[in-house]
Amino acid sequence: MGSFGFVEVESGAMNTSMENAKMSIQPLLTYDKIIYILSYLLSISIPICIFGILTNIVNILVFYKMGFSSTTNISLFCLAIADLLTLCYSLVASFGNHPAFVNADLSFSMLDVSRVGAHVYYSSCAIGSWITAVINVERSVCVVFPMKVKQIFTRKTTARLIAGMVIYQIASGLPRSFGVRFAWIPSAVTNRTIISYVIFNPRLVSLSYLVSFSIPNLICFFVVVLGTIFLISKFKQSRQLRSTMSGTGEKSNKLSDKDARLVRSMIFISVLYIFGASPNVLLYIVHSAYPSLHIDNPYLGYLHSLLLLATMVLQAASCSVNIFVYVRMGSNFKTKLGEMFYCRSEDS
Protein backbone atom coordinates (compact mmCIF):
# COMPACT_ATOMS: atom_id res chain seq x y z
CA MET A 1 0.00 0.00 0.00
CA GLY A 2 1.37 3.40 -0.95
CA SER A 3 1.73 6.49 1.18
CA PHE A 4 -1.64 7.82 0.09
CA GLY A 5 -3.69 4.66 0.20
CA PHE A 6 -2.74 3.43 -3.31
CA VAL A 7 -1.42 0.00 -4.16
CA GLU A 8 2.22 0.20 -5.13
CA VAL A 9 2.65 0.28 -8.90
CA GLU A 10 5.58 -1.65 -10.35
CA SER A 11 6.56 -1.29 -14.01
CA GLY A 12 3.16 -0.01 -15.02
CA ALA A 13 1.16 -2.70 -13.24
CA MET A 14 -2.55 -2.64 -14.08
CA ASN A 15 -5.65 -3.66 -12.21
CA THR A 16 -7.55 -6.74 -13.28
CA SER A 17 -10.29 -5.02 -15.23
CA MET A 18 -7.78 -3.00 -17.24
CA GLU A 19 -5.71 -6.09 -17.97
CA ASN A 20 -8.78 -7.78 -19.33
CA ALA A 21 -9.38 -4.77 -21.52
CA LYS A 22 -5.72 -4.89 -22.63
CA MET A 23 -5.15 -1.32 -21.57
CA SER A 24 -2.00 -0.05 -19.88
CA ILE A 25 -2.09 3.13 -17.77
CA GLN A 26 1.09 4.07 -15.98
CA PRO A 27 0.97 6.80 -13.32
CA LEU A 28 2.53 10.10 -14.31
CA LEU A 29 4.59 9.77 -11.12
CA THR A 30 5.50 6.21 -10.15
CA TYR A 31 5.46 4.95 -6.58
CA ASP A 32 9.26 5.02 -6.35
CA LYS A 33 9.41 8.63 -7.58
CA ILE A 34 6.71 9.81 -5.18
CA ILE A 35 8.51 8.19 -2.23
CA TYR A 36 11.78 9.85 -3.24
CA ILE A 37 10.19 13.30 -3.57
CA LEU A 38 8.20 12.97 -0.35
CA SER A 39 11.28 12.02 1.64
CA TYR A 40 12.88 15.36 0.79
CA LEU A 41 9.73 17.48 0.80
CA LEU A 42 8.43 16.36 4.19
CA SER A 43 11.91 16.34 5.74
CA ILE A 44 12.00 20.07 4.92
CA SER A 45 8.44 20.58 6.15
CA ILE A 46 9.03 19.19 9.66
CA PRO A 47 11.65 21.79 10.79
CA ILE A 48 9.63 24.57 9.13
CA CYS A 49 6.56 23.56 11.14
CA ILE A 50 8.49 23.32 14.41
CA PHE A 51 10.03 26.75 13.83
CA GLY A 52 6.63 28.21 12.92
CA ILE A 53 4.96 26.76 16.01
CA LEU A 54 7.59 28.36 18.23
CA THR A 55 7.41 31.76 16.49
CA ASN A 56 3.62 31.86 16.62
CA ILE A 57 3.63 31.00 20.32
CA VAL A 58 5.94 34.00 20.74
CA ASN A 59 3.57 36.12 18.62
CA ILE A 60 0.61 35.14 20.79
CA LEU A 61 2.46 35.96 24.02
CA VAL A 62 3.72 39.31 22.72
CA PHE A 63 0.33 40.45 21.40
CA TYR A 64 -1.27 39.36 24.68
CA LYS A 65 1.31 41.41 26.54
CA MET A 66 0.66 44.38 24.25
CA GLY A 67 -3.04 44.24 25.09
CA PHE A 68 -6.12 44.55 22.93
CA SER A 69 -6.54 48.30 22.88
CA SER A 70 -6.37 48.38 19.06
CA THR A 71 -8.23 46.39 16.42
CA THR A 72 -4.94 45.48 14.75
CA ASN A 73 -3.67 43.75 17.89
CA ILE A 74 -6.91 41.77 18.20
CA SER A 75 -6.74 40.65 14.56
CA LEU A 76 -3.04 39.74 14.64
CA PHE A 77 -3.46 37.88 17.95
CA CYS A 78 -6.24 35.76 16.41
CA LEU A 79 -4.22 35.32 13.21
CA ALA A 80 -1.31 33.93 15.24
CA ILE A 81 -3.67 31.40 16.87
CA ALA A 82 -5.02 30.33 13.46
CA ASP A 83 -1.48 29.99 12.10
CA LEU A 84 -0.46 27.96 15.15
CA LEU A 85 -3.31 25.48 14.58
CA THR A 86 -2.42 25.27 10.89
CA LEU A 87 1.21 24.50 11.70
CA CYS A 88 0.33 21.92 14.35
CA TYR A 89 -1.67 19.98 11.78
CA SER A 90 1.04 20.45 9.14
CA LEU A 91 3.56 18.92 11.54
CA VAL A 92 1.28 15.91 12.19
CA ALA A 93 0.62 15.53 8.46
CA SER A 94 4.34 15.73 7.68
CA PHE A 95 5.00 12.81 10.01
CA GLY A 96 1.85 10.97 8.91
CA ASN A 97 2.71 11.13 5.20
CA HIS A 98 6.46 10.70 5.55
CA PRO A 99 7.61 7.41 3.99
CA ALA A 100 9.64 6.63 7.13
CA PHE A 101 6.54 6.68 9.37
CA VAL A 102 3.52 6.01 7.17
CA ASN A 103 3.91 2.22 7.30
CA ALA A 104 4.90 1.98 10.96
CA ASP A 105 3.68 -1.16 12.74
CA LEU A 106 1.08 0.53 14.96
CA SER A 107 -2.52 -0.20 15.94
CA PHE A 108 -3.56 2.86 13.95
CA SER A 109 -2.57 4.44 10.66
CA MET A 110 -0.39 7.55 10.80
CA LEU A 111 -1.91 8.59 7.50
CA ASP A 112 -5.41 8.37 8.98
CA VAL A 113 -4.35 10.51 11.94
CA SER A 114 -3.40 13.26 9.50
CA ARG A 115 -6.73 12.82 7.70
CA VAL A 116 -8.66 13.31 10.93
CA GLY A 117 -6.71 16.49 11.66
CA ALA A 118 -7.46 17.81 8.17
CA HIS A 119 -10.75 19.18 9.51
CA VAL A 120 -8.83 21.45 11.89
CA TYR A 121 -6.34 22.37 9.17
CA TYR A 122 -8.90 23.54 6.63
CA SER A 123 -10.89 25.45 9.24
CA SER A 124 -7.82 27.23 10.66
CA CYS A 125 -6.57 28.05 7.14
CA ALA A 126 -9.94 29.54 6.26
CA ILE A 127 -10.06 31.55 9.50
CA GLY A 128 -6.56 32.85 8.77
CA SER A 129 -7.76 33.88 5.31
CA TRP A 130 -10.79 35.67 6.78
CA ILE A 131 -8.66 37.57 9.30
CA THR A 132 -6.07 38.57 6.70
CA ALA A 133 -8.85 39.88 4.46
CA VAL A 134 -10.36 41.86 7.35
CA ILE A 135 -7.00 43.44 8.23
CA ASN A 136 -6.38 44.24 4.58
CA VAL A 137 -9.79 45.90 4.18
CA GLU A 138 -9.27 47.82 7.43
CA ARG A 139 -5.94 49.22 6.22
CA SER A 140 -7.51 50.11 2.87
CA VAL A 141 -10.30 52.00 4.62
CA CYS A 142 -7.66 53.72 6.76
CA VAL A 143 -5.95 54.99 3.62
CA VAL A 144 -9.16 56.26 2.03
CA PHE A 145 -11.06 57.43 5.14
CA PRO A 146 -8.42 58.11 7.80
CA MET A 147 -10.83 60.07 9.99
CA LYS A 148 -13.60 57.45 9.95
CA VAL A 149 -11.72 54.17 10.17
CA LYS A 150 -11.89 54.05 13.98
CA GLN A 151 -15.65 54.52 13.82
CA ILE A 152 -16.09 51.77 11.23
CA PHE A 153 -13.68 49.23 12.71
CA THR A 154 -14.10 49.33 16.47
CA ARG A 155 -12.79 46.68 18.85
CA LYS A 156 -16.29 45.25 19.28
CA THR A 157 -16.84 45.15 15.53
CA THR A 158 -13.55 43.34 14.93
CA ALA A 159 -14.19 40.86 17.75
CA ARG A 160 -17.68 40.14 16.44
CA LEU A 161 -16.39 39.65 12.90
CA ILE A 162 -13.77 37.15 14.02
CA ALA A 163 -16.26 35.35 16.29
CA GLY A 164 -18.68 35.14 13.36
CA MET A 165 -15.95 33.66 11.16
CA VAL A 166 -15.15 30.99 13.75
CA ILE A 167 -18.83 30.09 14.18
CA TYR A 168 -19.27 29.85 10.41
CA GLN A 169 -16.24 27.60 10.03
CA ILE A 170 -17.43 25.28 12.81
CA ALA A 171 -20.98 25.14 11.42
CA SER A 172 -19.89 24.59 7.81
CA GLY A 173 -17.23 22.02 8.72
CA LEU A 174 -19.38 20.02 11.14
CA PRO A 175 -21.21 18.04 8.39
CA ARG A 176 -17.88 16.39 7.52
CA SER A 177 -18.16 14.44 10.76
CA PHE A 178 -21.36 12.81 9.53
CA GLY A 179 -19.71 11.57 6.34
CA VAL A 180 -16.82 9.67 7.94
CA ARG A 181 -16.37 6.95 10.53
CA PHE A 182 -13.68 4.78 12.09
CA ALA A 183 -13.54 1.07 11.32
CA TRP A 184 -11.27 -1.89 11.96
CA ILE A 185 -9.66 -2.76 8.62
CA PRO A 186 -6.87 -5.25 7.77
CA SER A 187 -3.64 -3.49 6.86
CA ALA A 188 -2.04 -4.48 3.56
CA VAL A 189 1.39 -3.58 4.98
CA THR A 190 1.50 -4.98 8.51
CA ASN A 191 -1.07 -7.77 7.98
CA ARG A 192 -2.93 -6.82 11.16
CA THR A 193 -6.22 -5.12 11.85
CA ILE A 194 -5.94 -1.39 12.53
CA ILE A 195 -8.29 1.50 13.22
CA SER A 196 -8.83 3.25 9.91
CA TYR A 197 -10.53 6.44 8.75
CA VAL A 198 -13.31 5.62 6.28
CA ILE A 199 -15.34 8.06 4.17
CA PHE A 200 -18.76 6.52 3.57
CA ASN A 201 -20.46 9.66 2.23
CA PRO A 202 -17.93 11.34 -0.09
CA ARG A 203 -20.50 13.75 -1.54
CA LEU A 204 -21.29 15.20 1.90
CA VAL A 205 -17.60 15.49 2.76
CA SER A 206 -16.78 17.17 -0.55
CA LEU A 207 -19.66 19.64 -0.16
CA SER A 208 -18.53 20.48 3.36
CA TYR A 209 -14.96 21.13 2.19
CA LEU A 210 -16.30 23.30 -0.63
CA VAL A 211 -18.43 25.46 1.67
CA SER A 212 -16.03 25.63 4.61
CA PHE A 213 -12.69 25.99 2.83
CA SER A 214 -12.61 26.32 -0.95
CA ILE A 215 -15.16 29.09 -1.42
CA PRO A 216 -14.12 31.22 1.61
CA ASN A 217 -10.45 30.80 0.76
CA LEU A 218 -11.06 31.78 -2.86
CA ILE A 219 -13.07 34.88 -1.91
CA CYS A 220 -10.57 36.02 0.73
CA PHE A 221 -7.66 35.42 -1.63
CA PHE A 222 -9.02 37.77 -4.28
CA VAL A 223 -10.02 40.33 -1.62
CA VAL A 224 -6.45 40.34 -0.29
CA VAL A 225 -4.93 40.52 -3.79
CA LEU A 226 -7.14 43.45 -4.81
CA GLY A 227 -6.67 45.14 -1.44
CA THR A 228 -2.90 44.83 -1.66
CA ILE A 229 -2.85 46.31 -5.16
CA PHE A 230 -5.08 49.12 -3.93
CA LEU A 231 -2.85 49.84 -0.92
CA ILE A 232 0.26 50.03 -3.06
CA SER A 233 -1.33 52.28 -5.70
CA LYS A 234 -3.08 54.66 -3.29
CA PHE A 235 -0.50 54.90 -0.56
CA LYS A 236 1.45 57.89 -1.90
CA GLN A 237 -1.75 59.78 -2.67
CA SER A 238 -3.01 59.14 0.86
CA ARG A 239 0.20 60.48 2.44
CA GLN A 240 -0.12 63.72 0.50
CA LEU A 241 -3.76 64.08 1.59
CA ARG A 242 -2.85 63.54 5.24
CA SER A 243 -0.08 66.17 5.02
CA THR A 244 -2.58 68.70 3.64
CA MET A 245 -5.20 68.00 6.34
CA SER A 246 -2.77 68.02 9.25
CA GLY A 247 -1.77 71.11 11.21
CA THR A 248 1.96 71.57 11.35
CA GLY A 249 4.37 69.93 8.98
CA GLU A 250 6.32 68.25 11.79
CA LYS A 251 3.25 66.57 13.25
CA SER A 252 2.10 65.60 9.77
CA ASN A 253 5.36 63.82 9.03
CA LYS A 254 5.18 61.88 12.27
CA LEU A 255 1.67 60.63 11.56
CA SER A 256 2.58 59.76 8.00
CA ASP A 257 5.57 57.71 9.15
CA LYS A 258 3.40 55.78 11.60
CA ASP A 259 0.76 55.11 8.98
CA ALA A 260 3.46 54.17 6.49
CA ARG A 261 4.77 51.45 8.83
CA LEU A 262 1.27 50.08 9.39
CA VAL A 263 0.45 49.94 5.70
CA ARG A 264 3.85 48.53 4.75
CA SER A 265 3.52 45.81 7.38
CA MET A 266 0.06 44.96 6.04
CA ILE A 267 1.44 44.78 2.51
CA PHE A 268 4.17 42.36 3.64
CA ILE A 269 1.67 40.22 5.57
CA SER A 270 -0.61 40.16 2.53
CA VAL A 271 2.25 39.17 0.23
CA LEU A 272 3.15 36.31 2.58
CA TYR A 273 -0.48 35.23 2.64
CA ILE A 274 -0.71 35.35 -1.18
CA PHE A 275 2.50 33.29 -1.39
CA GLY A 276 1.05 30.60 0.87
CA ALA A 277 -2.53 30.61 -0.46
CA SER A 278 -1.81 30.81 -4.20
CA PRO A 279 -1.01 27.08 -4.64
CA ASN A 280 -4.27 26.09 -2.91
CA VAL A 281 -6.29 28.51 -5.04
CA LEU A 282 -4.56 27.42 -8.26
CA LEU A 283 -5.05 23.75 -7.41
CA TYR A 284 -8.75 24.37 -6.76
CA ILE A 285 -9.15 26.24 -10.06
CA VAL A 286 -7.28 23.53 -12.00
CA HIS A 287 -9.32 20.80 -10.32
CA SER A 288 -12.56 22.64 -11.20
CA ALA A 289 -11.48 23.02 -14.83
CA TYR A 290 -10.00 19.51 -15.04
CA PRO A 291 -11.93 17.17 -12.70
CA SER A 292 -9.74 14.20 -13.65
CA LEU A 293 -7.02 15.62 -11.39
CA HIS A 294 -8.06 13.79 -8.23
CA ILE A 295 -6.60 11.28 -5.83
CA ASP A 296 -8.37 8.21 -7.29
CA ASN A 297 -7.20 8.81 -10.85
CA PRO A 298 -4.78 5.98 -11.78
CA TYR A 299 -2.70 8.33 -13.94
CA LEU A 300 -2.75 11.58 -11.92
CA GLY A 301 -3.48 10.31 -8.39
CA TYR A 302 0.09 10.46 -7.11
CA LEU A 303 0.61 13.89 -8.71
CA HIS A 304 -2.54 15.23 -7.03
CA SER A 305 -1.39 13.94 -3.63
CA LEU A 306 2.05 15.46 -4.12
CA LEU A 307 0.54 18.84 -5.06
CA LEU A 308 -1.66 18.78 -1.95
CA LEU A 309 1.34 18.19 0.29
CA ALA A 310 3.40 20.81 -1.55
CA THR A 311 0.66 23.41 -0.95
CA MET A 312 0.67 22.44 2.72
CA VAL A 313 4.43 23.01 2.96
CA LEU A 314 4.17 26.45 1.31
CA GLN A 315 1.27 27.34 3.59
CA ALA A 316 3.37 26.31 6.60
CA ALA A 317 6.29 28.45 5.42
CA SER A 318 3.95 31.41 4.97
CA CYS A 319 2.56 31.00 8.51
CA SER A 320 6.03 30.76 10.05
CA VAL A 321 7.67 34.04 9.08
CA ASN A 322 5.17 36.71 10.18
CA ILE A 323 7.26 37.38 13.25
CA PHE A 324 9.99 38.93 11.07
CA VAL A 325 7.47 41.40 9.65
CA TYR A 326 6.28 42.32 13.15
CA VAL A 327 9.83 42.82 14.43
CA ARG A 328 10.87 44.82 11.38
CA MET A 329 7.80 47.05 11.13
CA GLY A 330 6.36 47.20 14.65
CA SER A 331 8.40 49.17 17.16
CA ASN A 332 5.95 48.34 19.96
CA PHE A 333 6.11 44.64 19.11
CA LYS A 334 9.90 44.75 19.14
CA THR A 335 9.91 46.55 22.50
CA LYS A 336 7.51 44.08 24.14
CA LEU A 337 9.42 41.16 22.68
CA GLY A 338 12.66 42.49 24.14
CA GLU A 339 11.03 43.13 27.51
CA MET A 340 9.61 39.62 27.62
CA PHE A 341 12.92 37.89 26.96
CA TYR A 342 14.78 40.34 29.17
CA CYS A 343 12.48 39.50 32.08
CA ARG A 344 12.90 35.78 31.40
CA SER A 345 16.71 36.14 31.45
CA GLU A 346 16.56 38.07 34.72
CA ASP A 347 14.30 35.46 36.35
CA SER A 348 16.68 32.70 35.36
Image (spheres, rainbow, N blue to C red):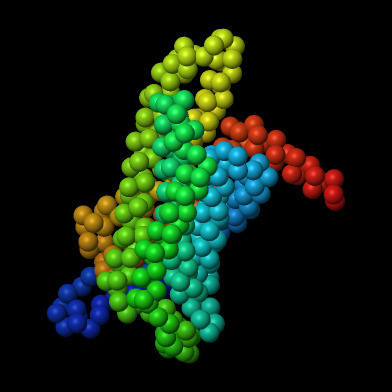
User: From where the camera sits, is residue 111 visible?
Assistant: no
Q: At x 43% / y 82%, what residue is drawn?
A: 182
> Which sits in the foreground, 298 or 265?
265
- 226 relative to 77, above or below: above
User: From where the camera sits, is residue 211 visible?
Assistant: yes
Q: At x 43% / y 54%, what residue is drawn?
A: 164
Q: At x 19% / y 82%, what residue is drawn?
A: 17
Horizontal arrangement in the rendering, residue 323 relative to residue 165 (left or right): right
- 144 relative to 202, above or below: above
> Which sits in the foreground, 101 or 35?
101
Horizontal arrangement in the rendering, residue 95 relative to residue 174 (left or right): right
Q: Position of residue 144 (x, y in %)?
A: 40, 26
- Seen as rendered, the residue at the extreme top is 248
Q: Quadrant of the N terminus?
A: bottom left
Which image quarter: residue 275? top left
Q: Position of residue 279 (x, y in %)?
A: 37, 50
Q: Position of residue 313 (x, y in %)?
A: 47, 54
